[in-house]
Image: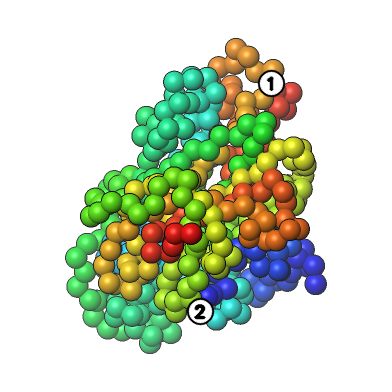
Amino acid sequence: MTDHEHDHHHHDHDHSELSETELRVRALETILTEKGYVDPASLDRLIETYETKVGPRNGARVVARAWSDPDYRSRLIKNATPAIAELGYAGRQGEHIVAVENTPALHNMVVCTLCSCYPWPVLGLPPVWYKSAPYRSKAVKDPRGVLRDFGFELPEATDIRVWDSTAEIRYLVLPMRPKGTEGWSEARLAELVTRDSMIGTGLPKQPNEVN
Amino acid sequence: MDGAHDMGGVAWSGPVIPEPNEPVFHAEWERRAFAITLAMGMPGGWNIDMSRFAREDRPPDDYLGKSYYQIWLAGLERLMLERGLIAPDEVKAGKPLHPAKPVMRKLTPEGVAAMLHRGGPTERESNGPARFASGDRVRAKVIHPPTHTRLPRYVRGHVGMVERVLGCHVFPDSNATGAGENPQWLYTVTFDGRELWGDGSDQGLKVSVDAWEPYLERV
């Protein structure tokens, strides 16, 4: 069975159990609410936060600032947590952040082989593939193969460095600034910064890919 | 514990399949499961290491057969059952059957932003000097505790180099069992690809883990 088939199988599996899981979550919320442990309005607030306020646009602003301001970039590389807090991003799952810089000689990639550790304040909640068995198993052994799964080939001469987030340190990749962006504003640069480029499974967009 | 969650380098790695324009959640129940889990941390009083253990401490077919938020849900139910916050017959009935257990704190809507902003920093005052410094060669110990640990199997027994000293941090192996925070020095330890995977490894590969001092011995 290929993994693609496995993936389909998994979805079917989810589907057949979906109603059961749905009912269970609903039941739990009822029990916890009636017992006074949770307030449904707090749940709504949490969901709204991660669906509308906290996401990879935050990280894109950090990267664009680092591309534009050499002093900021130095502060980010030296001690990322306070540098990121300068832009207002801090807290849960980003209490201790380290920024790692891509260069023509070195490409960085971030994984959590043990669970799903991810820098929430700058990237939001992790995508499904980041939490999946294929990524968690393959990233530390065959990261170039992972990059091929994402559709790009890393030059042979570029070394690759994988950061397995096994503690409460969260990693943010600082990708290389695309050529042909001299004089761009931070806001315009931020449009080039993709989520995957900050995990290390992608590259920033090229100038001709945005307006 | 040596569970199915410890996935680094295992053989069943297949293609990674990204989903274009992926939504934050894929179903309404995922939204609620996520939020209930975050909100219950306050009245529940457990810590992140206890949460992780409650999720990972299950048979491989169970762990691998569940979707991500189904694992969260199962972990949350276990933590609540263990503490008597809910009872099995209530989960079955889908409604409360027993009086609530008094809880110290509850997450209010007004408190959400502050709770998220505060987070849970793990760095603590050191109670002694760090044993290792950048550049030291260290071996990840061969350990197989039945309890929670954050030393992945694929580095155990292998030699790497201390790259960064990250300060003194809460030690998950103690914190997960309720034995206290027991802060320990934490290091980024970098391994050569060939050290981990043999001569067939990518020549230009380096992999690091963040490892607490008790996981390491000097070479």
Is residue B9 shown above or below A177?
below
User: On what subunit does the disc labeled 2 rest?
Assistant: B
x, y percent for residue A145:
75, 52
- CA gap between label 2 and label 1 equals 49 Å
Residue with the mark numbered 1: A179
Q: Quadrant of the N terminus of chain A?
A: bottom right
From this viewpoint, which residue is outermost toward the bottom?
Answer: B89
Q: Is residue A148 visible to us here?
A: yes
Residue density around tag 2, few if under 14, some if 14–19, many if 20 or more, within 10 Å: some
In front of the other: B144 or B203? B203
Q: Is residue A134 visible to us here?
A: no
In front of the other: A147 or A2? A147
Please, what secondary structure does the residue beneath circle 1 have? loop
Is residue B12 shown above or below B199?
below
User: On what subunit does the disc labeled 1 rest?
Assistant: A
Is residue B179 shown above or below A39?
below
x, y percent for residue B3:
54, 75
From this viewpoint, which residue is outermost toward the top?
Answer: A183
